[in-house]
Image: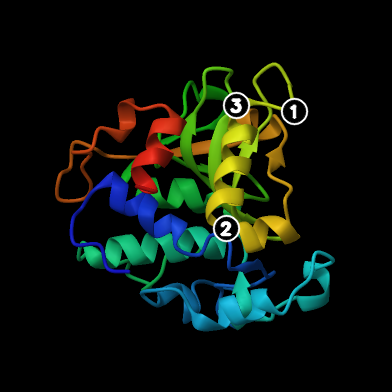
Amino acid sequence: MECVQKTLKNFLSAALMPVGSTMYVWGGGWNETNTGAGKDAMTVGVSPKWQEFFRCQTSKYDFKNYLYYRECGLDCSGYVGWVMYNYLTSVNIQCSSGGYVFKAGTQAKMFADMGLGSFTKNTDVKDFLPGDIMSSSNHVYIVIGRCADGSVVLLHSSPPGVQLCGTYSESGDKFSDAVYLSRSYMNAYYNEWYEKFGYCMRDTSYLTEYSQFRWDFNNFDLISDPDGLLYMSPAEVLSVLFN
């Protein structure tokens, strides 16, 4: 997909493109030397090989059996790097290395260092807004929004693959608003995936252990929010994205 407008909606729409049809593959999105983005993470649009590989899998899929099957899917930082490439290429912003795949623990800081927005370490994170990229030592995800119970709806590549998930509530309730929303949308729009891999829960570590990259919404040459997604609930954001 090539975004024609520099908007938060188009960034999140790009992030949705591999959802429900792309498996988690260790090394997916990386180059052969594991030093940066590979060809797949510097390609506009979804690779048809990802869906072909997904269609061959059963509910017993184990990513450990497919380590470094790079062309078959994406790992967490490969996915975020692919999303950034698809969005930023469309707004004529290029990384000097050509891609945006970095180690999960450094990805949020790297994007801020590129001048794309701000960085907040995990101990200082106070809120979650649509489009935030959350980075820990071993994982990275994209925020759709935070629900009234403190749970977060998110997009990420985590075994078994690229999907919408919801965290537990801030108080630790597993059956949170975010879990309900993510299950509802995965079932309604990605039913083949949901029938195989229905698990959409993530624990409260996603709320406390991740540092944050936030886009610079004052730079309209980079990103804008004419749809008002920043002020919407996750349910409202999803409604706009799937309308």
| Disc 1 crowd, CA 10 A, few/some/many (<14, 14-19, 20+) | some
Image location (x, y in percent) of residue 25: 68, 70
Look at mark 1 in the image and give the residue it sits on: 174
Image location (x, y in percent) of residue 91: 21, 61
Contact between marks 1 and 2 (CB within 8 A): the answer is no
| Gap between marks 2 and 3 measured at Cα | 19 Å
Q: Does any portion of residue 115 appear in the rendered image?
A: no
**Above/below status of 21 relative to 133:** below
- Name which residue lies at 65% across and 20% down: 170
| Gap between marks 1 and 3 measured at Cα | 9 Å
Give the structural element (helix, strand or loop) at label 2.
loop
- Name which residue lies at 29% across and 45% down: 8
- Name which residue lies at 63% across and 42% down: 183
Image location (x, y in percent) of residue 96: 32, 70
Q: Amino acid at mark 2?
A: Tyr
Q: Amino acid at mark 1?
A: Lys
**Above/below status of 223 relative to 128:** below
Q: Amino acid at mark 3?
A: Asp
Out of 6 and 176, give the one closest to the viewer.
Answer: 176
Look at mark 2 in the image and give the residue it sits on: 190
| Disc 3 crowd, CA 10 A, few/some/many (<14, 14-19, 20+) | many
Give the structural element (helix, strand or loop) at label 3.
helix
Position of residue 219 in the picture relative to residue 20 (left or right) = left
Out of 28 and 108, give the one closest to the viewer.
Answer: 28
Q: Which mark is residue 177?
A: 3
